[in-house]
Image: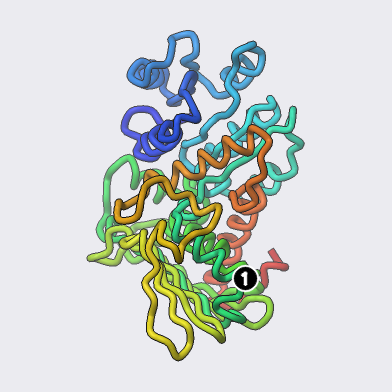
Amino acid sequence: MVGGGEGSFIGYVHRVAARLDGEYELVAGALSSRADVARRSAAEFGIAPARAYDSFETMAQTEAARADGIEAVAIVTPNHMHFGPAKAFLEAGIHVICDKPLTSSLADAEALAAIKPDNGARFLLTHNYTGYPMVRVARAMVAEGRLGKLRVAQAEYVQDWLTEAVDTKQAEWRTDPARAGGGGCIGDIGTHAYNLMRFVSGLQLEALSADLAAFVPGRRLDDNVHMMLRFEGGARGMLWASQVAPGNENGIALRLYGDKGGIEWRQAEADTLWFTAFGQPAQRITRASAAADISNAGHRIPPGHPEGYFEAFATLYRDFAAVIRGEPREELPGLADGLEGMRFVTAAIASSTANARWISLNDI
C-alpha cells in the first residue's frame, strides 16, 4: 500500500476490502511521506520493518527485485500523489489498484494512460459503487433492453460535511487546488455519480453544461455542482453533486428512464432496486432474490442480510484478483474510465468558467 497510514479513512477501507475474501495479504508499504508515521503505521498493520519504505520509488524498485515481491499495490494517497506511484509500479511490472480520481489533472491522466506496463501489469480504479450487487443487476437489466431505448438519466451524490469551513485532514487536501486538482466537489464525488451513470446506462456523453459554485466564503474549489448532459443517440441527463446540502450524509442515487420502463437505486437502500415497466406497478427487486440472479452480481450472503460499503469495495478487489490470475472481468473500471473521468471534470470546469456554455467532450 502507498499512503493510507494512521488517520487515513480510505486506507482503512481498502485494507478491509482487500482482506474480506481472503485474496490479499498486506506485506509491504510506503504508508506516509513522513518517515515516523510510515514506520508506526507499518508496525500497527503487521508489516515487517524491512518492507516498510520511506518512499514509493524505493518500494517499487525493491519489491520488483524481490523473489517474493508484491503482486499488486493499492494507492490511497491524495489526488496529486496518484500519478507518480501508479507510473512507478506499472513500469516495475506490479499491478496497480488506485483510488479515484485517476490523477489531479487531465495531462497526468493522459500520460498515465500512455504508459506501457512491464510484465503485463493491470490497473484497477476503485469506483466502488460499481461493486454493489444491485448496481450490477441494474446494468444487466439495461443491457437486456428491459428499459427500452434510454431517454433520461439522472445521478446525484450529495453530502453536508463541508457546509461550513472545516479544519480536518480530510477537508484540508480536498479543498486545496494544489492537492485535489482543479475541481473540488466535482472531482471528489461528482466523478462517482458520473461513473455510476455511465456504468449502468452505457450511454456515451456527448456534451455538458455545468455550473460549479463555492458557497463557503474563502473556499477555493467548488462545493456544489449542477449539470445538464447530452448523450449520443439523443438521451438527456442531469447530475447534482454537493457537499453543502444539510441533511444529506452520503446520498448517492441513480434514476434511468427508457421508452419501456425505469429503474431507481440509492445507496441508502443498497440491496433494493426499483423497476417499473411502463403502465405496470413498481417492482421491488432485492439482492440475491430470483429477480436479481445474474452471474456477476457479486452476492456473498443470503437474501435479507444486508451488504454494504465495505463489501462493494471488496467486490472490486475480489474481481481484480481474478484478473491477476488471468480471468476476464469486463465490468471493472480501469485506466480508460479514469481518463474519461478526468475529461469529464475538465469539461465541467471549462463549461462553468464560460458561464455554463455547452462543452463537447470531443473538444477536451
Residue 41 figure quarter: top left
Identify the image's colour scheme: rainbow, by chain, secondary structure or one colour: rainbow
Considering only vertical position in the picture, is 34 above or below 214?
above
Query: From where the camera sits, is residue 227 visible?
Result: yes
Q: Please name whichever residue, 47 or 165, is drawn nearer the observer in this view of the structure.
A: 47
**In the image, 30: left or right of 311?**
right
Considering only vertical position in the picture, is 214 above or below 169?
below
Q: Please name whichever residue, 233 or 223, is drawn nearer the observer in this view of the structure.
A: 233
Residue beneath the point at 68% across and 35% down: 326
Crowding at mark 1 (Cα within 10 Å: few <14, some 14-19, many 20+):
some
Considering only vertical position in the picture, is 208 above or below 280?
above
**In the image, 110: left or right of 348?**
right
Residue 98 figure quarter: top right
Residue type at the position of mark 1: Leu
**Image location (x, y in percent) of residue 88:** 64, 29
**Image location (x, y in percent) of residue 246:** 24, 65
**Image location (x, y in percent) of residue 270:** 36, 59
Residue identified by numbered label 1: 203
Q: Please name whichever residue, 263 or 229, is drawn nearer the observer in this view of the structure.
A: 263
**In the image, 175: left or right of 198?**
left
